Amino acid sequence: MRFSDRKALLPRDIGLILSYRCPSACAHCLYNCGAGWHDWMTADQVQLALENARTAWGPGFQVHLTGGEPFLNYPLLLEATRIASDLNIPVYVETSASWCRDRDKAEDRFCQLREAGMDAVLVSVSPFHQEAIPLRRTLDGISAARTAFGQDRVMIYQSQWLTELSQRGMDAGVPLEDYTEAYGKVQAGIRLWKGYGLISGGRAGYQLGNLVSKSPPESFSHLDCREELLFAHHSHLDLYGHYIPAFCGGISLGDWHTLQQLFESARSDSLQPLVKALIHGGPYQLYKLAAKKTGYQCLAKGYAGKCHLCVDSRKALVAAGIFPDSLQPEQFYQSF
Ligand code: SF4
Ligand code: SF4
């Protein structure tokens, strides 16, 4: 089947993953970010990625500078902002504000970013972030960003948690066990999974899967991943050259240095075998493949969602050295 009826790989919101390094290592992180990652994109790579994106996609897309935590390398963040702005690409930054220990310094940084051409700021807020990041830092970050950018250009993702988070504490991390103690396991699971709209990929299935009922592989057999892999509005280009579709941490569609080639492969249904298996048969097909090629056995307790099945099957394939081009970056699979 060809996909010429709809344009594949036409994201409108493109994240540049400047690094997977992040001090928070949240339980729900889809990209398995944490302190164990050390590499960063260079300014030259940012320039090249954005020029390639502009050539491939023309105008009409926006870029978010992300990670990991992009403020851990503030000079690069500032330079990347200038590069995007010089190319007339709308740009915003995603941050957890974990770095925001001094509100005035934070305001200076946001003002510099605005001067460099940054258009907006997104601050992440959730119970998962609050495990590692005292809420006061997040609120200081929001306040500093609003002073620099104005209320309308600061997005809080997800603002509905702010009231509850402030009741749980301002100056220290709050463990997720507080939710199970307060609501009981079932209600806490509903609040955290449904309330946030968690995706079970990355660490979430492993670290938060105990809060939801799990299902065997067969229950996902009717689901494919065509939309996520080919038609995602939101995708990422990372520092290692990988095109990471949608929120599928650990899957590389190919090399963003050769985007035209990637588009051709997508449109003629000739992407890498692992990606094709997911497009047509979803994680259940991947599970069958992992079972056949590696002897993978399904988790006795089942899976928290289709992405949990996908990630766990991929771990077995990685351990057996199968599909190394698509199962990237490598360190993703050592960072659960
Ligand atoms: S979700 Fe965000 S803040 Fe948390 S570990 Fe991942 S990148 Fe860091
Ligand atoms: S099952 Fe795998 S390929 Fe499909 S959306 Fe989830 S992580 Fe992506």
Image (cartoon, grey):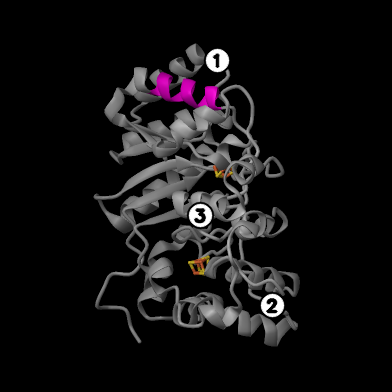
Residue 29's x, y, as percent? 57, 49
- Residue at image coords 40%, 23%: 145
- Residue at image coords 62%, 39%: 22
- What secondary structure is the stretch in magenta mostly built from? helix
Residue 144 among those drawn in magenta = yes
Magenta span of residues:
135-145
In the foreground, 169 or 306: 169
Q: Quadrant of residue 83?
A: top left
Which is in the foreground here, disc 2 or disc 1? 2
Alpha carbon distance from label 3 to label 1: 35 Å
- SS class of the residue under badge 3? helix
Which is in the foreground here, disc 3 or disc 1? 3
Amino acid beneath label 1: Asp
Mark 3, other Cα within 10 Å: few <14 / some 14–19 / many ≥20:
some
Residue 185's x, y, as percent? 61, 53
Report if the beta carbon of the residue with label 3 is closer than 8 angstroms to ligand 1: no
Residue 190 is labelled as: 3
Mark 2, other Cα within 10 Å: few <14 / some 14–19 / many ≥20:
some
- SS class of the residue under badge 1? loop
The residue where tag 1 is placed is: 102
Mark 1, other Cα within 10 Å: few <14 / some 14–19 / many ≥20:
few
The residue where tag 2 is placed is: 298
In the foreground, 135 or 89: 135
